[in-house]
Amino acid sequence: VLVKSAETVVQPISLTVTVADSINRNGLEDRIIAAITDLLQIQRRRELNELTHADIIYKVKSEVPNIRNVTITTPADDLFLPSDKVILPGEIIVTIQGV
């Protein structure tokens, strides 16, 4: 049996999060980054070669309360890579705007 090791793909992620102006923003960016990092940890229940906008949005909104909207700018589309690839988080850029 020949076993080929997986190739890692470091994926930068940029998103804009909308919150009410009345929300305290202290530590908000760190909590969002932690949620995305947790989402992309190597674990059995995750498809390691897939990253969808829906998964990012769900994770951020479920982990960080009071978020009104999440818009993903990078990656521009959902990622479905070959099965020998593993997506890991690269630089995570979070922009927070109020309404």
Image: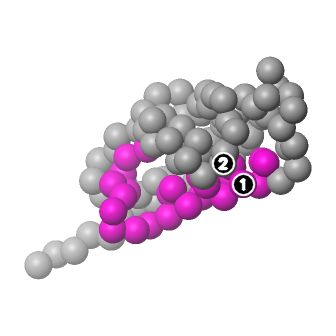
Q: In which quadrant of the rendered image does the C terminus lie?
A: top right
| Amino acid identity at mark 2 | Val
Is 46 included in the stretch rendered in magenta?
Answer: yes
Asked if residue 60 lies left or right of residue 16, the reply is left
Residue 91: horizontal and vertical position, in percent?
Answer: 69, 49
Query: What crowding class fits label 2: few (fewer than 14 Cα within 10 Å), some (14-19), or many (20 or more)?
Result: some
Residue 51 seen in the current view:
yes
The numbered dot on residue 64 is 2
- Which residue is under mark 1? 31
The residue most toward the top is 99
The residue most toward the bottom is 1
Instruction: Judge by depth and name the residue closer to the eye, 23 or 33.
Output: 23
Q: In front of the other: label 2 or label 1?
A: 2
Name which residue lies at 68% across and 36% down.
Answer: 67
Could you tell me which secondary element the residue under label 2 belongs to?
A: loop
Residue 60: horizontal and vertical position, in percent?
Answer: 59, 45
The quarter of the displayed image where residue 81 is located: top left
Is 80 included in the stretch rendered in magenta?
Answer: no
Disc 2 to disc 1, how far (Cα)? 7 Å
Asked if residue 76 lies left or right of residue 80, the reply is right
Name which residue lies at 66% across and 29% down.
Answer: 68
Name which residue lies at 44% across and 67% down.
Answer: 42
The quarter of the displayed image where residue 96 is located: top right
Name which residue lies at 83% across and 38% down.
Answer: 23
What's the magenta region?
A: 28-51
Could you tell me which secondary element the residue under label 1 belongs to?
A: helix
Residue 25: horizontal and vertical position, in percent?
Answer: 86, 43
State if disc 1 and disc 2 touch (CB < 8 Å): yes
Instruction: Judge by depth and name the residue closer to the eye, 96 or 22.
Output: 22
- Relative height, residue 65 to residue 86 (above, below): above
